[in-house]
Image (spheres, rainbow, N blue to C red):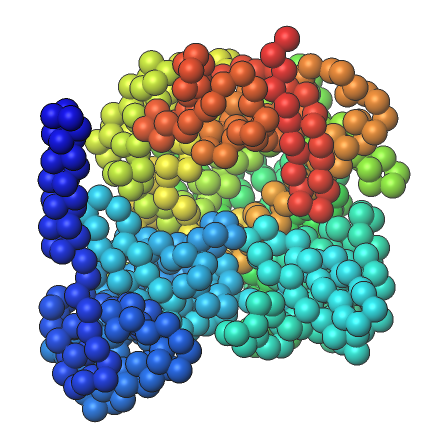
Amino acid sequence: MTTNNKKKGKTKEKGKKKDQRSQTTSPKKYSFQDNATGTVLAILAEKPDRQLHATQFHRKFGAKDLFSKAAIEALLEQLALQKLITKVGPLTFQALGQGDPAFVVGRVDYVNPEYLFVIPEAGSSGETNRDIWVHRRHAANVLDGDTVKVLVHKFRKDSRPEGEIVEVVKRARTDFVGRIEIGNRHAFVVPDKRKMYHDIFVSLRDLNGAEHGEKVLVTITEWESSDKNPIGKVTKVLGKSGEHETEMHSIMAEYDLPYEFPAEVLQAAELINEAITPAEVAKRRDLRGVPTLTIDPEDAQDFDDALSLRQLENGNWEVGIHIADVTHYVLPGSILEQEALRRATSVYLVDRCVPMLPEKLSNRLCSLRPHEDKLTFSAIFEMTERGKLVSEWFGRTVIHSQRRFSYEEAQQVLTTGQGDYVVELNWLNRVAKLLQKSRVKKGAILFETTEVKFKLDANKKPIAIVPKVRQDAHKLIEEFMLLANKQVAEFVFNLRKSKPKNTMVYRIHDAPDPEKIQNFANFAKLFGYTIKVDEKAISTSLNELAIQSEGKPEQGVLQQLAIRAMSKAKYTTDPTGHFGLAFDHYSHFTSPIRRYPDMMAHRLLQHYLDGGEPVDKLPYDERCKHSSEMEKRAAEAERASIKYKQVELMQDLKMAGALKNRSLPGVVTGVTEWGIFVEVTETRCEGMVRLTDLQGDRYEFDEKKYCLVGRRYGRTFRFGDPVKVRIKSTDLEKRTIDLFMDED
């Protein structure tokens, strides 16, 4: 009995304490009936710097029915209009006099269907320059890449700011590529774009002739905030899903890149006079008698650069870098000029080049084909036997190439010491190596990524993937193109001593972000490598890493991550230098057939050679920004086409039984919280082993050590680890390969 009484007493005491706790922590109750205005003001005054959503007022007033909730929301809106409280967002309010709400303008990165980040624009107002986390329920009807205004409503020291999107400032795009699915009453387009998480509703009257399962281009025409899916109409039928031409055109459309020339542009190209008149030759430096050659890929259709070489009487050498004079044919303001600017770059997919200029220009008039007179813009240098620069000359020329080499043919001459132009090629190769050595000494970074190319059959089906091998012949051309680009930029920059300096289009590359390079250094340390993060020592440190990791499993991963840690190169009129090349000034002068910035550089250089004054920077800044964006899109389209063909190859091999029960060696190329990316060594194709498919343990992502760790047995998977995998499945539409880990 005594024991029971004690227990009852303890229970009673516990209940008493519990009652006291509930009294202390229970939310304060309010009545909406009496002095509702004063009550709202009192609620906000409790924490004047806090922003409250209408749903929080619902709870505080105990409103449960729709009528009561609507009355509260109407009151809040009225008080905001009367400027008694501050409205900071949709149904979000704050006490008056607390300053401007924390609005930030930025770009949407829609990470997955559940949430997104808003990346603030430079100079955006607000209280943060960190990425803002937004849950999908606060994302309204935004799409990846949109520019939006976001209300930041949570700031925490140990976490990202959180927010709510209140306005779409600018749509990134309204056109999407996808597969159309047609039902009895309506249709939907399932977009190809990975970060597009909404199917697009299409009325049957807006199909534009599309049939079920075809790839189409659809334009979003409306999307009310209350609608789950956007509404659109089919603007173009691309073809049957899965066919090669359809998929290549789909990739171009997905990245909003043109793959056909308007009829009027083609007509303008055809009207260009091909004749090189004596009057035109008289305006130029005639170099047709100088030994001249081109070195390009075996399957190249356009040859936009040539090299000439001859020894001078004083023993020095005159080397000429000759570039197709595109701006002689493409005049400012012409329809050809407008189209070149719109495209800004040629696009290289797995099986084709989608040119910036019509074929008559890119493959005929401006292609430095052998045994033809050609109009060129040249950089001519007098150099010593050891490659020291003695003098330079820039101007318009006419040349005649005597020999077209493929890279393989030129390499054969360098390797054997026999063949056409053996003296010239050996001199160029030797000096190229000296130029590279000089660049490295000054801080240039020599990281290289392994590129791949496909062997395709007659139906454009991939039958093999082979790595592109860079040999001396490739590096020879590269070094002399770098020399021309560098000297042109320095010439224009130094031509005018006083301010304002001459406007020029530069290719710049900033020093890496200290935080990114420190993160990479921490990662490299896990493999036993030391990276010095001081800006002056980074390049030397990275070059040492490239040498030390050569041939090791982690080589590819380390070089890829090092490149990601670097800043992105871009076009601008600001001469801030090129960190990766260790050049104070650098431009793009050598490929006007395929890059619009090179056309701008040609025009500006000629303007200053003619004694012109500095031109207005603003139009060039805008064109530089556009060119940088188009270059990025072109690179993404190229990667998408490679990925598509990689998945197609693995799918074909799997269906043919070539991969049945095969264990495939690979290397871990990425580790995330949802799985492991593995590159299959044999085919260079990358797939994913999802976390749910990792057997034998429960794995967790260790963000600091960049690895997955088994909770029970401690097994780890990290970048560079050699593994064995099997093919689980392939998805051509999503361009994904799923893998199983092979534990045998």
In what quadrant of the picture does the C terminus appear?
top right
Q: In which quarter of the image is residue 455?
A: top right
Q: Where is residue 110 in the image (x, y as percent from the top left)?
A: 47, 54
Q: Can residue 95 be seen in this view?
A: yes
168 or 269: nearer the eye?
A: 168
> Against 439, is 340 above or below?
below
Residue displayed at 50% across by 37% down: 480
Q: Can residue 578 be seen in this view?
A: no
Q: Quadrant of residue 483?
A: top left
170 or 730: nearer the eye?
A: 730
> Against 529, is 209 above or below?
below
Q: Where is residue 718 in the image (x, y as percent from the top left)?
A: 45, 21
Please give left or right for residue 434 compared with residue 62 in the image.
Answer: right
In the displayed orientation, state which residue is furthest to the top.
744
Q: Quadrant of residue 49?
A: bottom left
In the displayed orientation, state which residue is furthest to the right.
458
How many circles with numbers are drawn on the protein? 0
Please give left or right for residue 511 compared with residue 473 in the image.
Answer: left
548 or 489: nearer the eye?
A: 548
